[in-house]
């Protein structure tokens, strides 16, 4: 059973969870997970939550361009995948905080390496883009 706004990964069962799949196949569980964690909203949300727990509206203010609906769907999917925890604090009004899980922290380590690469290599990528674009104009 899935929560509203989430999806089950086709072909994924506890039996397939321990087997490597064919990441090039559309129904591969690994590919489905890569699609999820490669999504820009997921990456940005995880990185922010890696800094510490946050409320929904604080996340929304920090992530420029994300809609309320998209952030809600992203948080629900990350929670379902065990990367984010949702905690309801019984205050008046009720407060909901999101935080990273140990599994999510492990993922942030890998994402941080990719971000560092992008920061270091962006000038080379920008130069390649300029060369490519100049060839198309001629």
Image (tube, rainbow, N blue to C red):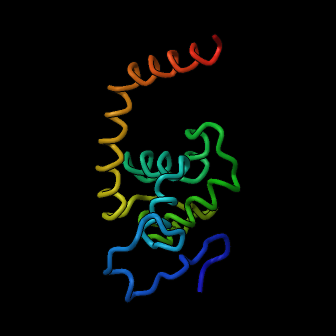
Q: Residue at x 45, y 86 (%)?
A: 13
Looking at the image, which is closer to me, 109 or 27? 27
Report the residue at 61% width, 36% height from top: 64
Whole-percent x and y of residue 100? 39, 59
- Where, quadrant-wise, is the N terminus in this rendering? bottom right
User: Where is 61 relative to 91, above or below?
Assistant: above
* Residue 2 percent across, percent down from the top left: 60, 81
Tell which of 23 and 33 is nearer to you: 23
Query: Which is more toward the observer, 33 or 1?
Result: 33
User: Where does the image place residue 133, in percent across and percent down from the top left?
Assistant: 58, 18
Residue 99 location, quadrant: bottom left
User: Who is closer to the viewer here, 104 or 130?
Assistant: 130
Q: Seen from this angle, which residue lies furthest top?
A: 138
Left or right: where 4 falls relative to 21: right
* Residue occupying image coordinates x 70% and y 56%: 69
Where does the C terminus fall, quadrant-wise? Answer: top right
């Amino acid at each position: 059973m899935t929560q509203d706004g989430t999806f089950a990964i086709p072909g994924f069962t506890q039996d397939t969870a321990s087997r490597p799949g064919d990441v090039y196949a559309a129904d591969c569980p690994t590919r489905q997970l890569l699609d999820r964690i490669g999504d820009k909203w997921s990456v940005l949300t995880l990185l922010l939550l890696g800094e510490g727990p946050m409320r929904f509206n604080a996340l929304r203010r920090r992530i420029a361009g994300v809609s309320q609906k998209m952030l809600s769907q992203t948080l629900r999917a990350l929670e379902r995948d065990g990367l984010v925890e949702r905690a309801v604090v019984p205050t008046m009004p009720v407060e909901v905080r999101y935080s990273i899980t140990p599994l999510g922290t492990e993922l942030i380590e890998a994402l941080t390496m990719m971000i560092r690469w992008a920061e270091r290599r962006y000038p080379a990528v920008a130069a390649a883009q300029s060369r490519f674009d100049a060839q198309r104009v001629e």
